[in-house]
Amino acid sequence: MRAILLPLLLLVAACGNTLVMRGGVEAPSAASQYAGATDPGDPLEQLNRRILDINTVADDNIFRPVAETYRAVLPEFGRLRLRAFLDNLGEPLIFAHNLLQLRLDAAGTTFGRFAMNTTLGGGGLFDVAAAQGLARQSGDFGQTLARYGLESGPYLMLPITGPSNLRDTLGAAVDGFGNPLLLALGPVFSAYTLGILNTTRGTLGGIDLRAENLDTLDILRADSLDYYARLRSVVRQRRDAELMALGRPSAMEALDDPGHTPPALDDPGTTNTPAPAAGPAGQASPPRLPADFVARTLRQADLSRPGEAAGEALPAAVPLDGGWARSVLGGARLTPPVRP
């Protein structure tokens, strides 16, 4: 790892206040945009921004080319099979955390998924359980700690692995060593072999995840005035949405750069975002807003991101985030017409 990071550190230092993005476009480095900590949940912001610059250089020069090659060489059918297989390997760990969190219904669903996909799905190559209504559940040690009241702690930007927080970093370390599937294989394979298997699984999963999100991260970087702040906000919202789905209250934070909302994969909080709190006594909460009405109203009201021509149509490739749209429309006192 040190052999990789040292040249990257030198490269980031040589870049000064800018980083060269894909296509030769220079963009401000995250570190150069630091103007003092503005978020109490991110006391290490200056260091985190420098690590993001290192990760960005590493991604542009190593991880993205590998992911592009992977996507070019392996057809979509093969990538889907590998993704399903890796997901199935993770089901025992999810099952364990479902039990620890006392989510017995989720544990039953996870057990049924693993049994069905392992037997009828060709060892997990095909997700036949989803077609039977058994949706994949979530579960990790960081989530379990949150379930029992442990706060997230400071936001962290980790080398290579990216955004996290203190609680989830601890959880990821525990999950890496405590995977029930690897523990079950312990009597059969040596510790060295198990380490190789675990590293290979993690590497393949990381390459597949990066290949799956090539366009998503491009949009996030290109459409953000401050890539670091937007990434931090999106990651927090995604994790908060996941925890709220488990019934744990968590305050959702507005996007730092709401000009363009990243695709739903990176910010899936729209379906789990709680309804806005009721206003003054006797006043009902505003209705949920359909995407077509939001787009039309924003265009009519000339509400646009900084630097965008007023009234310019929103890009069709980027879906609207319901929570942000409601806050904008509420601030502008724009509400849908009352239907009889």
Image: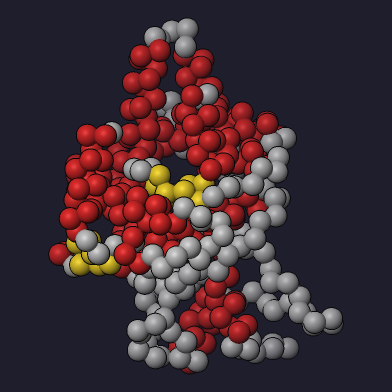
Residue at screen point 68% across, 77% down? 287
- Residue at 31% x, 41% y is 207
For the C terminus, give its image quadrant.
bottom right
Q: Residue furthest right?
A: 282
Q: Quadrant of the N terminus?
A: top left
* Residue 7 can be seen in this image: yes
Question: Residue drawn at (59%, 88%), measured in percent from left and top?
Answer: 332
Number of marks in the rendered image: 0
Is residue 247 shown left or right of residue 290? right
Picture coordinates of residue 337, whole percent (x, y): 65, 89
Q: Quadrant of residue 122?
A: top left
Residue occupying the point 42% across, 37% down: 84
* Foreground of the two, 251 or 155: 155
Q: Is residue 160 above or below residue 180?
A: below
In the image: residue 267, left or right of residue 111: left
Q: Can you say whether 302 is above or below 201 in the image?
A: below
Dividing the picture into quarters, in which one does residue 102 lie?
top right
Relative to the observer, which residue lies in front, 172 or 155? Answer: 155
- Camera-side residue: 112 or 237? 237
- The coloring applied to the image is secondary structure
- Pick out the residue farthest to the front: 36
Q: Is residue 135 above or below residue 273?
A: above
* Residue 191 % position (x, y): 40, 12
Quarter-of-image position of residue 331: bottom right
Q: Is residue 115 above or below residue 102?
A: above
Residue 21 in view: no
> In this view, which residue lies farthest toward the left?
24
Residue 284: percent from left, percent from top: 77, 79
State the image coordinates of residue 204 (x, y, percent, origin top left): 32, 35
